[in-house]
Image (tube, rainbow, N blue to C red):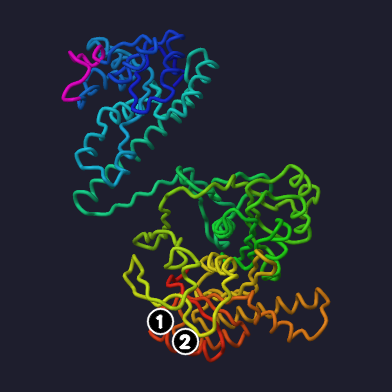
Amino acid sequence: MSDLKIETCVMSVSDKSGIVELAKFMQERGVTIISTGGTGKLLLENGVRVTAIREVTGNEHDDYFDGRMKTLSFNYESALLYKRDNAKHVAQAKELGVPKIDMVVCNLYPFEKVTCDPECTTDTAIENIDIGGPCMVRAAAKNYYHVAVVTNPGMYAEIMAEMKEHDGCVTKKIRARLAVEAFKKTASYDSTIDQFFSHRILDEAVLRLNYRNGQQLGRYAENWHQKGWLFQSPTVVEPTVPHAKQVHGGSLGYNNYLDAESALRSVLEQGDVTAVSIIKHNNPCGYATGETLREAIERGWQGDPVSAFGSVIAVTRPFDKETAEFLKDKFVEVLLAPSISGETLEYIKSLGKSKANFRLFEYGHIETKPEVVHMDYRAIPGGMLTQVRDEKFYLTENMEELFKPAFEAECENSGKKLTIGIVTKAQPPKDRMGLYEFALRHVRHVKSNAICIYREYEPGKYQVLGMGCGQPNRKDSVMLAGMRATDNIGREFVDNKLDGNKDEYVRSVLAADNVVLVSDAMFPFRDGLDNAASTGVKYVIQPGGSMRDEEVIAAADEHGIAMVHTGVRKFYH
């Protein structure tokens, strides 16, 4: 299994990017290039000498049956499979006139790309099933002791660098890695074919997930007695924690990954604004926007300064020194930012042991969401649950259309008919729509039953005042949210040394038109709304849809509360 001198190379590719450059590189080093129809034509047009594949297969023509038969033959597959260090194999190859092929460069018909089109016909899909390609790839990969196989155009530069460094050879280490990549490719390819035809012919949905690079996580997983692993998806179209770049601190544990994912997904809800999400046990207990990142994190921290101890934080702006200074004396496990400046990193390091294990990650530039339907998955014993990601906040096209007198709307997915809009006599202030949008984008990330209270603390700047999460009944969630908001506003009164009575100040803040209470799901009985009224809040947003909506609306009218129904439930389990 020594270094392999590349003297003969077969090139047969569907994706032709970079193939001419690679072929010219090979030709300059005296490598004989064997190629199939389309690839060979392109190489000839670009001045590369090519031996036709029929010289190896023994066929009279390069292809038959409209291209369905090209490379499959005893001679060609034998050229890939016989062992060069086995005297019997070498003698048989010589007797049969089987040549020695050292490298195969092959990528497959674009079945995945073609069948992504919902208009793709069965006949079109069939004609894009590669037969000869997977055969030659698997044969070369099986015999990687003696053959190199390249299935990814992104590897061409590395192959050329490898051959330059090793006098035209490919090392055993690289050949082994190339073989594994080849097996992954054919496995994924066959999986895609299975999924398409199982659905098209058998009307059977098949789910085959592809995760790689599995690594054990630290000393334990969720609890001390459990072991855990992380696997990465090879294809992502959004910022993710497993693909983020770590720039400081130790490795993440199982719970860190869960909290970091919650932090990143929740903060990205706010789009291109300066925002902070502070996570504890998967709930965004601190959440705010601000003019600067320092302002946003200060306001976010106010949401629950006790729970923020040992938290995981994600932000939408580069992590700067001013924000790092705010965290100097605070215990935070992990922080994720689009980027982290060198100045900030040096400052964190200068704090010594207290921040030695402060895990810092860069998740990259936030781009506009591509038009992709994101799916969420959850494994349960004996099965896998999957659903389209929750990215809808109201049944109207925009918030403005929601702020109208009550009207009937229908959920397109479920067919459920709901009364949405302003359902009470009291009217909510229409100049607070930014606050309501902020609130709905936060509450969807809070574990059900979820009740949260929000404030627009300055024009266009928002924060969570109180969160009630994860309770088996909505009444308790309301009380928890009210209690937390009361504590936070009371602390604000004391910290700012305000004049007057603290309790009166708290009540005045909660009753103001820049504060709103949001429920992730309907109030099934009026008691939940009565509890909401007891907090002093005068504005409520909820989905509606209860059998007792009229009773709940009547209760809101009794309390002088303005209430809006969105028609969209935000359960999160």
Q: Which mark is residue 99?
A: none
Residue 333: name its quadrant: bottom right
For label 2, the residue is: 552
User: Which residue is located at x 63 percent, y 46 percent?
Assistant: 362
Q: Is residue 514 left or right of residue 197?
A: right
**Pointer 1 with pointer 2, Cβ within 8 A:** yes
Crowding near pointer 1: few (<14 within 10 Å), some, many (20+)?
some
Question: Is 42 on the left or on the right of 119, as rendered?
Answer: right
Residue 292, position as x, y percentages in the image: 71, 56
Helix, strand or loop for the magenta stretch, by majority: loop
From the image, tell me which residue sits under label 1. Answer: 546
Residue 516 in the image: above or below residue 462: below
Using the image, determine if residue 39 lies above or below residue 345: above
Task: Decide which of 352, 120 is in the foreground and name it.
Answer: 120
**Which quadrant would residue 273 be assigned to in this image?**
bottom right
Q: Which residues are magenta?
A: 54-66
Give the alpha-carbon distance from disc 1 to disc 2, as whole Å: 9 Å
Give the residue type at disc 1: Ser
* 60 magenta-colored: yes
